[in-house]
Amino acid sequence: MQQSTEARPYDDVKTTITETWREAWDTGTTDALDSLFAHDYVRVSANSGKERSAAETKTEISDIRAAFPDLTTTVDRILIEGDQGAIYWHSTGTFTQPLNDVPPTGQSVTTHGSNLITITDGRISREEVTWDAHELLADLGLKSLSSAFESYPEDVVTDDLSGEPSAESLKAFNRQFITGVTVVTTTDEDGKPRGLAVNSYNSISLDPPLVLVCVQKTSSTYPALFRSTHMGINIMSRNQRQTIGTFASKAADKFAELDWHSGAHGSPLIDDSAASIEVEIKERFQALTHTVFIGRVRSADASEDEPMIYKAGKFFDSQDLTAL
Ligand SMILES: Cc1cc2nc3c(=O)[nH]c(=O)nc-3n(C[C@H](O)[C@H](O)[C@H](O)COP(=O)(O)O)c2cc1C
């Protein structure tokens, strides 16, 4: 497109920003930005340093709008001094569609940001985007901004992933680690109980009462779990060998033959477990193939039944352990 080389007065630039942003961010007409961006436009993320061209910026807007279909963006203030300026804005939307590989949480999010702009001949040639990632992430229940906006999470895995140790030596190491085994539960969008066997449970702290589980993203329970505000964690007793087999499987209705009840926040809790807790999900750390869910314990119930033991692919009875 032909660009005027004549410098626009500040007010014209402000009007163009407000109008083209409304068209691009609120209606999805990203080509409106052609009249705002200079031919060598670049958008730099202040968080990651990543640079995007005009075309990539338009794609990013479309991707975010697809994930937050009701997104509205308000330009709160524009300041321009010489060839430098700042746009202060906030956006509100509901995360109802996947964003890259991140399933929607259904939550409504408001985020504030500011873009530092360089103006060349009345158009934006460079834009450095700073937004309050913390606020957005807390609302989304995500720790890593990149987990939502990049194709892979760079804060968790920053390293070269190849090399030592081999899978075999890591498996050998894991086989020496004895755990209990839990069933992590939630309900899906239809209110149906869902769950899977999990031995990656760990207690983080007593005060505040935080726990974690790691769940593989290929699990059929995962999308429902990611969307949930709460989950149940049931420690299997020595009498629940059949139950753990069911939850380690891909059975369509794992709860069909089971006695269970709903916790105060709706998570399915399995009757006769050694112990059950219901937790509020606070963080969802992305770790490539898995998500680490961190939860705050909201209720806890322990029985006298002895727990089941898991070691090197086999389940054991914990009743007659010898103390050292
Ligand atoms: C003892 C044991 C521990 C397991 N621990 C985990 C775990 O921590 N995280 C995980 O994602 N899967 C774990 N699994 C595997 C899942 O339970 C299994 O893949 C299950 O079939 C998933 O079911 P779904 O796809 O219906 O959710 C474990 C399985 C067993 C038998």
Image (cartoon, grey):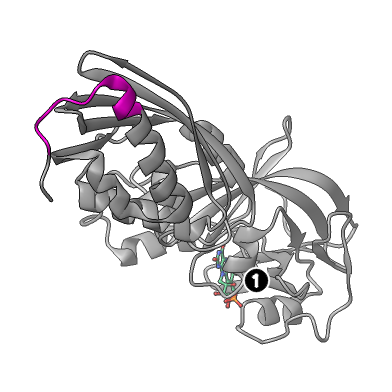
Residue range corresponding to the magenta coloring = 4-14
Within 8 Å of ligand 1, the CB of disc 1?
yes
Judged left or right of residue 92, residue 113 is left
Residue 199 drawn above or below residue 211: below
Check disc 1 and give the amino acid type: Leu
Judged left or right of residue 25, residue 204 is right
**In the image, residue 313 lies at what x, y percent?**
54, 73
Relative to the observer, which residue lies in front, 76 or 212? Answer: 76
Relative to the observer, which residue lies in front, 119 or 105? Answer: 119
Q: Is residue 60 magenta?
A: no
**In the image, residue 155 lies at what x, y percent?**
37, 41
Residue 4 in view here: yes
Image quadrant, ligand 1: bottom right
Dot 1: what SS? strand
Residue 237 drawn above or below residue 87: below
Relative to the observer, which residue lies in front, 100 or 128? Answer: 128
Q: Residue at x 65, y 72 (%)?
A: 315
Residue 283 in view here: no
Q: Residue at x 53, y 58 (%)?
A: 69
**In the image, residue 48 lies at what x, y percent?**
30, 36
Q: Residue at x 41, y 56 (%)?
A: 28
**In the image, residue 111 lies at what x, y percent?**
53, 36
